[in-house]
Image (tube, rainbow, N blue to C red):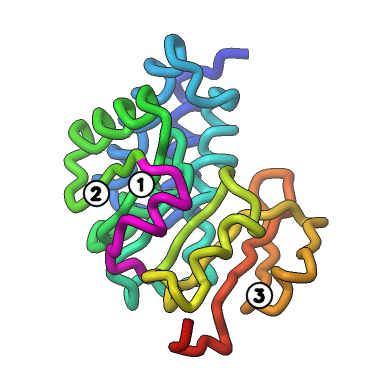
Amino acid sequence: MVESAEMVAIDWQNFKREASLTEQQLAQFQQYYELLIEWNRVHNLTTITDLKEVIHYHFLDSLLLGKFVDFSTLSAIADIGTGAGFPGLPLKIKYPHLSVVLIEVTEKKRQFLRVVCEALGLENVEIEALDWRTFLRKTSYHIDLFCARASLQPEELIFMLKPSSPYRDATLVYWAANDWQSLPKEAPLILKEELYRVGARWRKYVFFKNKNLSQKN
């Protein structure tokens, strides 16, 4: 069902209030949504296109991480398998001081990310085409926090925490279902789990950190 203009305006104002956005940030999210819908007609970037669902399950699902992370203390984040830019771009809009690395192997999605960054005036955003293991081998960005929302499983992601990795000191946050359970090799690296509700769903952020890191390989 198509919402009236009044209902659409209410949806956006509710989002602005819940996410504590400025007018400029709200306008950026509105433009982001319009570009997402326009590109999705041709490139199938997401199965979620209803405005309320995009707000809840893409935008807020990205931004609610700010309840558990003090982004004012961070300078750089990376988004693994970012797809259409979630959570990296919503976090960049909300916290514009961040440098952001978007890791995405699919060219059509990288094209979309470049268009969004240009249209929204987002600076200090790097878009990397490397697969995850190649990224770990061939790059050495300064990254405080890695985000993995809808990409690889933790057993693959935690390679970044090996003592030989240039990203061994960073924290990894994984977007998980409420009933997600860790594998034995993942459990020692879990720093904390934080339950949250977005829309009608309960989910959790799982934070991984090499808590007993040795500088020896």
User: At 59% across and 33% down in the image, what residue appears?
Assistant: 53
Give the residues drawn in magenta, as a range.
130-143
Badge 3 or badge 2: first in the primary sequence: 2
Residue 126 percent across, percent down from the top left: 25, 48
Q: Is residue 138 magenta?
A: yes
The residue closer to the viewer here, 199 or 44, is: 44
Secondary structure under the numbered disc 1 in the rendered image: strand
Residue 75 percent across, percent down from the top left: 28, 69
Q: To which residue does mark 2 refer?
A: 125
Figure quadrant of residue 193: bottom right
Amino acid type of the residue that numbered disc 2 sits on in the rendered structure: Val
Amino acid type of the residue that numbered disc 3 sits on in the rendered structure: Ile
How far apart are labels 3 and 2 at the CA level? 28 Å
Asked whether the viewer can see residue 122, the reply is yes
Secondary structure under the numbered disc 2 in the rendered image: strand
Residue 200 percent across, percent down from the top left: 73, 44
Mark 1: few/some/many CA within 10 Å (<14, 14-19, 20+) = many
Which mark, by number, is residue 38? none
How far apart are labels 2 and 1 at the CA level? 7 Å
Q: To which residue does mark 1 refer?
A: 102
Quadrant location of the N terminus?
A: top right
Q: To which residue does mark 3 refer?
A: 190
The residue closer to the viewer here, 23 or 100, is: 100
